[in-house]
Image (cartoon, rainbow, N blue to C red):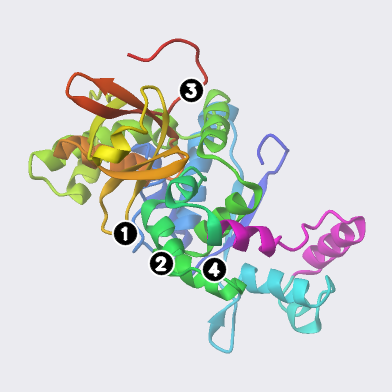
Amino acid sequence: MIEDGVVDYVDAANVSTDLIIRKAREFASRGIFSGIPRELPNRNVIRWFAVNEFLYGKYGRKMRFHIIPELTVDGSKISGREIRQRIIENNLQIPPDVARVLPDTTISILEREIERGTVPGRRNLEIIKERMNNLSQADLMEIAYLNADAVNSIVKNRRFYRENQIWAAFRKAGYGPVLTRLAMSSIEMNVRRSEVRDLIEHYTERGWIPPDQSVINVIRRAWFVSERVAEGISSKRANEMFQSGKHRVNPPSKVEAGLNLRRDEVKLVRDGMDAKIYVDRRGVLSCQIRNGAKIKSPMHLPAQMATYLRLIIDSHIIPFSAKVKRRRDGFRVLITINNQRKTGSEP
């Protein structure tokens, strides 16, 4: 927005501007933008303030922030999601009850963009339902913004016939409205983790991504937490430790796991075959191999590697791929984390 010439930013909050500024500068000074506690009131506004502070170093100027009280109707906060939904349900006409809570300039802009046809249309729910009803756990795991809990909630609650069933499945997985929309959009457009990773790396190179949200930092945090958990420290405390300062972390880019194959399955498996990683309904890290038949196997990993891989899977954006490898003691699966498009042979 700063590059586009925006100089003022208006948002609503139910806490004082002084508190927001103080908290935002505290997080900005520590380089923390994604780890703002959920219990902190208006944390998204605080995050905007913090990022504004961060981008000052790049642009030499900041947007002026203006905080206004949150507007309520009949005791409920005015929700942007509800406003959008009401306009869509009203055939892209702004109904009187919605117009009553919007500034005149906002109404003018909305009407102009609706007339131009630039307002996004409805989701293709048929494609979303088809993929959620039919893709395997392993295939769903490759889509951006889906973690293991979301994938298993999708599989458990199949079949999906209505949009509210889709929302309920994500809610059961702990997803809020924003993350649910990201996940649904990714399913609809078949957005892969690698595409989001590439976009984030592009933004990082341009200086638009705070350090704690870079791809490499997400991976480093996963490895650091897995090391501390192996020492008996809780994952929550380990994450706090990572955010508290800089740490020398050298996460592995490859993880090798054992397989549990039946005799008839061993005959179907070949060295170099593609494999797909997922987490089964019991929470066990597992592998899927296709060679005519679909072969599924739990994976055997040291505890720290299992924690590390699970954190990568639950990152929403870090891609991973796997290949079957023949070793002296049998078949194993080699998992590559944050796999890039490179040539060359695997070990």
Q: Disc 4 marks which residue?
A: 166
- Circle 1 sits on which residue? 281
Q: Position of residue 35 (x, y in %)?
A: 35, 48
Per the image, label 1 sits on a secondary structure element best described as loop
| Of callouts 1 and 4, the N-terminal one | 4
Q: Which residue is mark 2?
A: 156
Does any portion of residue 5 appear in the rendered image?
yes
Q: Is residue 114 above or below residue 252?
A: below
Number of numbered discs on residues: 4
Amino acid type for the residue under numbered disc 4: Ile
Residue kind at label 1, given as amino acid type:
Arg
Which residue type does callout 3 highlight? Answer: Gln
Q: Nearer the viewer, residue 156 or 147?
A: 156
Q: Can residue 175 be seen in the rendering of this structure? A: no
Looking at the image, the residue that sits furthest to the right is 115
Which is in the foreground here, disc 2 or disc 4? 2
Specify whether 248 is left or right of 29: left
